[in-house]
Image (spheres, helix red, strand yellow):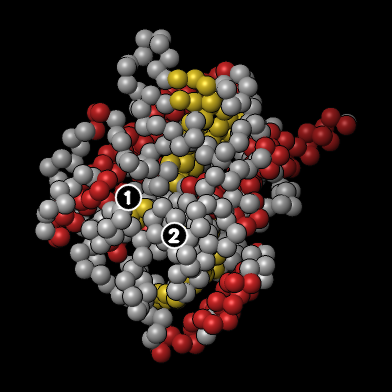
Amino acid sequence: MKLLTTLAALLTALPAFAEKQPNILYIMSDDHAAHAIGAYGGRLSKLNPTPSIDRLAKEGALMENTFCTNSICSPSRATVITGQYSHTNGVRILGEPVLPENQTLPLEMKKAGYVTGMIGKWHLEVEPASFDYYSVLNGQGNYFNPVMNDKKAGKWPDNIVHYPTGKGSYDSLHTDDVITDLSIDWMKQQLKSGKPFFLMHHFKGPHDNFENAERYDFLYDDIEIPEPSDLYERSKNGPLDHEPYGTSVSGRNSRRNMGHHMFVDPNLEPREYTHVSYQRYLKKYLRTIRGVDDNIGRVLDFLEKEGELDNTLIIYTSDQGFMTGEHDMIDKRWMYEESLRMPFVARYPAAIKGGTKVDQLANNVDFAPTLLDFAGVKEMPESFEGRSFLPLLEGKTISDWPEATYYRYWMHMAHHDNPAHYGIRTKKYKLIYFYGLQLDTKGEKKAPTPAYWEFYDLSKDPQELNNAYADPEYAETIKKLKSDLLDLKEEIGDTDEKYPELMKVREETWE
C-alpha cells in the first residue's frame, strides 16, 4: 500500500501530458538574432539561414515576444541558470561568477531525477560543478581546435582537454562541430541508463569574429545581403539632440567599427565603405549560423535514429539578440529590438502542437521555471523571480501573465560605447532611460554621459526609427510608463536608492 501511495504521488507530480519525464535538450547559441532565423521572418529569412531551427518551429512552438533582461553573454546565462535578474544573482557584467551552490537549474533537475550535462560555452568564471558532467570551453573559447575543461579529465581548472586529441582527428576542428560530437556521445550514453537527461548544449557561434567552418567559405558568396533601411542615413532613433552612441558598421565610430573587423579599405568613400563592411559582416555571420543550424540537424537526426526525438523536449534559443546593421549598429547590449529579443522555439509533440505561436511577453528569468515545469517540478525554488510559461506553449492562457518586461544594461561605455540604461517594454510601447553612469561595477572607470530618454510606439514604428519622446501626443502615455517602470523596479527589487549619484541624475531628468 505504501508503495502504491508513493507511485501515485510521483505520477501526480509529473505534467499531465507525460507518462514519463521527457528528456530535455536545451540548445543555446551566442548572439543569434531572431531575425536571422527563417521562422521569424524579416529581411534575412529569404536567405533560408536556418532550416533545422525552422523545422523545430514548424513542429513545435515559436515564442514571438521573448526578451533578455540584460543583453550581454555572462549575465544572460546567469539569469537562465539561476532564474534571477542580474541585480539579484550578482552577474551584472562580464567576469562575475555563479557559484556552484547558486547554479539552481541543474541542481533542481538532479532533484527531479535527471542526469545533467553542460557541454559548450559556459562563460560563468567558475566550475559548473552542479552538473553531473560537463565539458566546457575554456573562457570565451576559440573557433577552431577548442580547449575544453572536462569533468572526466581531473580537477578544475586543470582538467584541460585539447582538440584535436591526436586520435586520428582532422588537423583543424571547428568548435561547434566538436561541441555537437560531445553532446551526441553523452546523450548516447545516457539513453542506455534509462534515466531522463537534461543537457545544456551551448554553441560558441555565431559570436564575433564569426569564424565559420571551412565548408561554408563560399556560402552567400554571390548574394547581395538585404540591408536595413537606416544603414546609411541616421533615422530619428537614439538621442534627439546629439549623435548616437555605439559601435557602427560604417566609419561613424572611428574608434571601433565593423570595417575595422572586416579589413575594409579605409580609403573607400563612406557609402562604399559601409556597403562593403556590411556585406562582409553579414556573410560571415550567416555562415557561422549555418554551421550552428546544420549541427542542430545532426542532433535531430541522432535522436530520430534512436527513437527518442518525440520523447525529448528540444528548446532552441540564444543568450540574446544582435544588431546586424540596424541604426548602423553592431554587437548587442542595447534595449533596441534586435538586441533585446531572444529567439525561443520548443518542440515536444506530447505537449506542444506544431505551428503554435505565442505572442505573450516573456523573458529569460522565466526559462528555468518553465524547464522545471516540463520536468514535473511543481514546487519551484523560492529564489526564482520568474514563472513558467509552459501553459502558453500548450496553447492555454494565463489570466495574470505580466504585461511588461524589464531590462537593465550595466556595462557603461564598455567595449562598444553603450551608455548604461534601463527600461520597460510592453506589447505596444518601449521606454528607455539612459542614465549614463558606471555605478559600482568593476572595470576601467568611464566618465558619465548625459542622461536622456527614448520612447517608441512599436505598433506604429516596429523598427524604432522615430524616438517619439518629445511628441506631445504621447505625453500621458510616457508619464504612465515612467510610473509603471518605477513600480516594476520596486516589484523585482532593483531600486536605485543605494546609488545617490543616480538618484541625483534622476531628480534632474525624470520629468
- Tell me the tag on residue 36: 1
Question: Which residue position is annotated with label 2?
Answer: 413
Determine the residue located farthest toward the top in the rendered image.
Answer: 167
Write the residue at 16% across / 52% down. 266
Question: As drawn, which residue projects farthest toward the right?
Answer: 1
Instruction: Locate the N terminus by quadrant.
Output: top right
Please tell me whether residue 323 is drawn above or below residue 435 in the rendered image.
above
Mark 2 element type = loop
Asked whether residue 297 appears in the rendered view, the answer is no
Give 245 or 175, whichever is nearer the viewer: 245
Q: Earlier in the sequence, mark 2 or mark 1?
A: 1
Q: Position of residue 426 (x, y in %)?
A: 49, 70
Q: Residue at x 33, y 57 (%)?
A: 247
- Residue 363, compared with residue 235, is above or below; it is above
Q: Is residue 259 left or right of residue 411?
A: left
Measure how far apart labels 2 and 1 are at the Cα level: 27 Å
The amino acid pointed to by label 2 is Met
Residue 441 in view in this figure: yes
Q: SS at mark 1?
A: helix
